Image (tube, coloured by chain):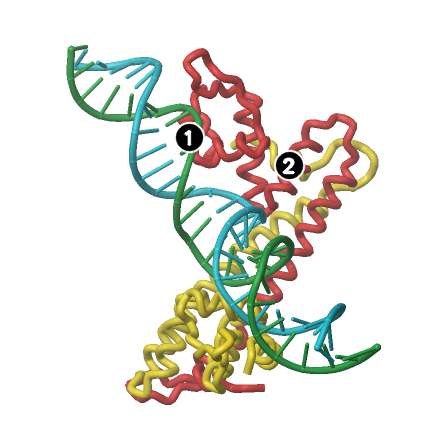
Chain colours: A yellow, B red, C green, D cyan
Amino acid sequence: MNIGDVAKRSGVPAKTIRYYEEIGLIRPRRSENGYRAFADSDLHKLAFLGRARALGFSIEECRTLLALYEDDGRESAQVKAVAESHLAEIDAKIAQLQAMRETLARLVRACHGDDRPDCPILADLAHLD
Amino acid sequence: MNIGDVAKRSGVPAKTIRYYEEIGLIRPRRSENGYRAFADSDLHKLAFLGRARALGFSIEECRTLLALYEDDGRESAQVKAVAESHLAEIDAKIAQLQAMRETLARLVRACHGDDRPDCPILADLAHLD
DNA sequence: CTTGAGCTTCCAGTGACTGGAAGCCTTATG
DNA sequence: CATAAGGCTTCCAGTCACTGGAAGCTCAAG
């Protein structure tokens, strides 16, 4: 398979696939003409990576997960630890965004949004502690 | 005021203040010795920027908000539009994170997390559509 | 006079791509 | 068989918003 095929089949853009090779996540063979020649195992890895990235795992977490995936002697506890740590980060990010959201929503509600200049949003931002 | 003072008073790190000057968000005067000389208005702007950034506004949105803040002829509707658009982005991000969170939490619950290798988290990631 | 803190500029790196240029390779069509 | 289109290659630069560090100037205290 050429890069275009795996890109289509895995859903990972060709540019991204080249980048993943550059940082050592995958190591496709090369054909005689210099083209990358992807095996089924490469396609599987890329699909794996695509899904892990979609769940928000960082590249380094993906590297760890991929290594665990390929290690028959892994302990599921290791995988779970990575996932739990990531879950905690997601929860923290959600909490932070929700705090922002509350403040912002309050300000937006308070702003009449007409042609006059006075605005509680700017007033809040300008307020010195 | 020197940069260290405004950094402490505004809560914006000195490095970040220099960066904000570089991209034209602030234009402090210079003393004869070459040091930046911050006026109260600069301090206010930095505090403004710090708060706007804390609410998740992008630098370009901050630039717009700062311009509106300084424009006596602004219409509060313009400010509200920026804030509402940002609020929508935040909501989208929260929704996306919550979707990730649900999937991930389900997988974590399903993984027994012991010394055996079989793991529903990896199984899910590896699953080809 | 020296020491240490604070200031300056400039360069490089972060994360995870993404866009684009220049050029080789392959395939389809006239 | 020539050519044109499309796919592949590498390399370089840009994104966003800083952040770290090096080299060197300035200032206040002892």
Judged left or right of residue A40, residue A101 is: right
Residue at point 59%, 41% (across, down): B52
User: Looking at numbered disc 1 in the image, what kind of residue is underneath it?
Assistant: Lys
- Eyeballing the image, is B83 above or below B99? above
Q: What is the secondary structure assignment of the residue under circle 2?
A: helix
Judged left or right of residue B115, residue B85 is: right
- Eyeballing the image, is A122 above or below A33? above
Whether residue B125 is visible, yes or no, is: no
Q: What is the secondary structure assignment of the residue under circle 1?
A: helix
Image position, residue B72 (x, y; %): 75, 26
Residue at point 67%, 44% (across, down): A107
Image position, residue B40 (x, y; %): 54, 20
Judged left or right of residue B38, residue A119 is: right
Residue at point 45%, 65% (across, down): A58
Image position, residue C3 (x, y; %): 17, 22
Judged left or right of residue C18, residue A53 is: left
Chain hosting mark 2: B
Quadrant showing the C terminus of chain B: bottom right
Tell me which label, 2 or 1, sits earlier in the chain: 1
What's the mark number on residue B8? 1
Q: Estimate the spatial distance between the alpha carbons at disc 2 and disc 1, rounded to whole Å.
A: 22 Å
Instruction: Determine which residue is flagged by label 2.
Output: B63
User: Looking at numbered disc 2 in the image, what kind of residue is underneath it?
Assistant: Arg
Image position, residue A6 (x, y; %): 56, 79
Marks 2/1 same chain: yes
Chain hosting mark 1: B
Front of the two marks 2 and 1: 2
- Eyeballing the image, is C10 above or below B57? above
Q: Residues within 10 Å of mark 1 (few under 14, many from 20)?
A: few
Relative depth, front residue between B28 and B73: B28
Relative depth, front residue between A125 and C24: C24
Whether residue B65 is visible, yes or no, is: yes
